[in-house]
């Protein structure tokens, strides 16, 4: 499966946020998107999912134009930066709604064993983020959009998610953004930089220095 995000144009008044964006993502590969704060990374994922309507867009799956928002297909999972789990439902029930189990989750994330029948309000901000990321990544679907999954979680669990993403990409298209660019470089097979409102394919990590995204790359 191939997802193409083409000719995206988003503006507010006279100010362009995205202009002529093209991203190609494939099953079996992780596609990373980098860019500075405010460059439009989150807006792009909202457009792909269907929550944000731009001035122009062309979404294709295996060459076929998708006229309806992708979320209507129920084939796409989207991790936004906003809390999405209802506070009044036990998390074990939430996991069942996603056709996942709490037991499998805690086998990967051991520190959650202390919770016997938790609700989302029992958790810290970082713990909420871990659960939301796990649900979106591991539940059934063909396309996974992850907006800053590594932010505000412990380094140990960042590494755990990198392992899980590498496994899940075998049967999913995964698009990921984060400010933690080293982790994006580690997990991504294809990489794009959003700069000056447009997308730039990155073939060598040294290009991130050339385009001024980072001052240097650690050896």
Image: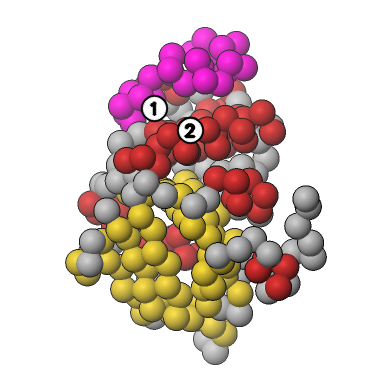
| Mark nearer the N terminus (1 vs 2) | 1
Q: Position of residue 204 (x, y in %)?
A: 60, 63
Indicate the quadrant where residue 62 lies. Answer: bottom left
Q: Secondary structure at mark 2?
A: helix
Q: Which mark is residue 94?
A: 1
Judge whether residue 95 is colored magenta.
yes
Residue under the image location 67 percent in, 40 percent down: 152
> Which residue is under mark 2?
164
Name the colour scheme.
secondary structure
Image x and y of residue 22, in percent: 42, 72
As measured in the structure, the alpha-carbon distance from the residue carrying label 1 to the one carrying label 2 is 20 Å
Of all residues, the one furthest to the bottom in this rendering is 14
Residue 204 among those drawn in magenta = no
Q: Which residues are magenta?
A: 94-117
Which label belongs to residue 68? none
Q: Residue at x 47, y 21 (%)?
A: 105
Q: For residue 214, what is the image quadrant? A: bottom right
> Badge 1 local density, few (<14 within 10 Å), some, or many (20+)?
some
Q: Position of residue 163 (x, y in %)?
A: 52, 33
Relative to 18, 54 lies left or right: left
């Amino acid at each position: 499966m191939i997802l193409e995000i083409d000719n995206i144009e988003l503006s507010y008044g006279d100010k362009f946020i995205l202009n002529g964006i093209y991203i190609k993502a494939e099953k079996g590969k992780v596609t990373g998107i980098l860019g500075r704060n405010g460059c439009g990374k989150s807006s792009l994922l909202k457009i792909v999912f269907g929550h944000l309507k731009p001035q122009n867009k062309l979404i294709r799956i295996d060459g076929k134009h998708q006229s309806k928002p992708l979320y209507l297909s129920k084939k796409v999972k989207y991790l936004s930066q906003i809390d999405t789990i209802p506070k009044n439902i036990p998390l074990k029930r939430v996991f069942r709604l996603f056709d996942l189990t709490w037991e499998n989750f805690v086998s990967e994330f051991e520190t959650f064993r202390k919770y016997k029948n938790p609700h989302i309000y029992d958790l810290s901000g970082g713990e909420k983020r871990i659960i939301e990321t796990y649900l979106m990544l591991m539940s059934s679907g063909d396309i996974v959009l992850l907006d800053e999954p590594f932010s505000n979680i412990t380094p140990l669990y960042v590494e755990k998610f990198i392992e899980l993403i590498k496994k899940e990409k075998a049967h999913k298209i995964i698009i990921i953004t984060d400010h933690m660019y080293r982790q994006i470089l580690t997990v991504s097979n294809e990489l794009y930089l959003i700069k000056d409102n447009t997308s730039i394919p990155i073939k060598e990590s040294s290009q991130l220095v050339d385009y001024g995204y980072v001052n240097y790359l650690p050896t």
